[in-house]
Amino acid sequence: MDVPCSSLDEVRQRIDEIDRSLVSLLAKRGNLVTQAASFKKTTDDVKAPARVEQVIAKVRAIASETGASPEVVEQVYRAMIAAFIAEELSTHAQLTNAPSGS
């Protein structure tokens, strides 16, 4: 367990460190999402609602195991997934509309 903070400044500093890590991880996840677009044939493959629900179930379980709020984790993941799907749809459209042989 983390050592308790002794001031609001310390809390904010630790949050800033976590934010840096989270953004770095989001960048890695985003790169993989972009790569996934090239393997998907249709926009339905990109949207993949069944896969979204699998991910939500998995992260809710992880949240329960780690002491995080499953509801908060689900909300964050749904927002994140929606943003990544929008980005992946854009990438997918570019890949499927690209002239072949270029």
Image (tube, rainbow, N blue to C red):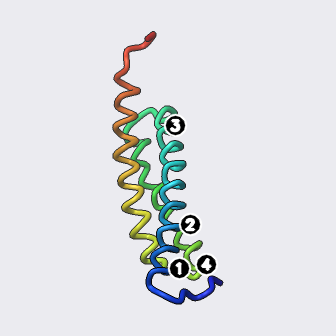
Pointer 1 or 2: first along the chain: 2
Gap between marks 3 and 1, in whole Å? 30 Å
| Mark 1: amino acid | Ala
Q: Residues within 10 Å of mark 2 (few under 14, many from 20)?
A: few
| Mark 4: amino acid | Thr
- The disc placed on residue 35 is 3
Number of the front mark, 1 or 2? 1
**Which residue is drawn at the image coordinates 57% and 79% (left, top)?**
64
Pointer 4 or 3: first along the chain: 3
Gap between marks 2 and 3, in whole Å? 22 Å
The one nearer the camera, 10 or 44, is 10
* Residue bearing the label numbered 4: 66
The one nearer the camera, 62 or 23, is 23
* Residue bearing the label numbered 1: 68
Gap between marks 4 and 1, in whole Å? 6 Å
The one nearer the camera, 33 or 42, is 33
Percent coordinates x, y for residue 33 in the rendering: 49, 44
**Which residue is drawn at the image coordinates 52% and 34% (left, top)?**
39
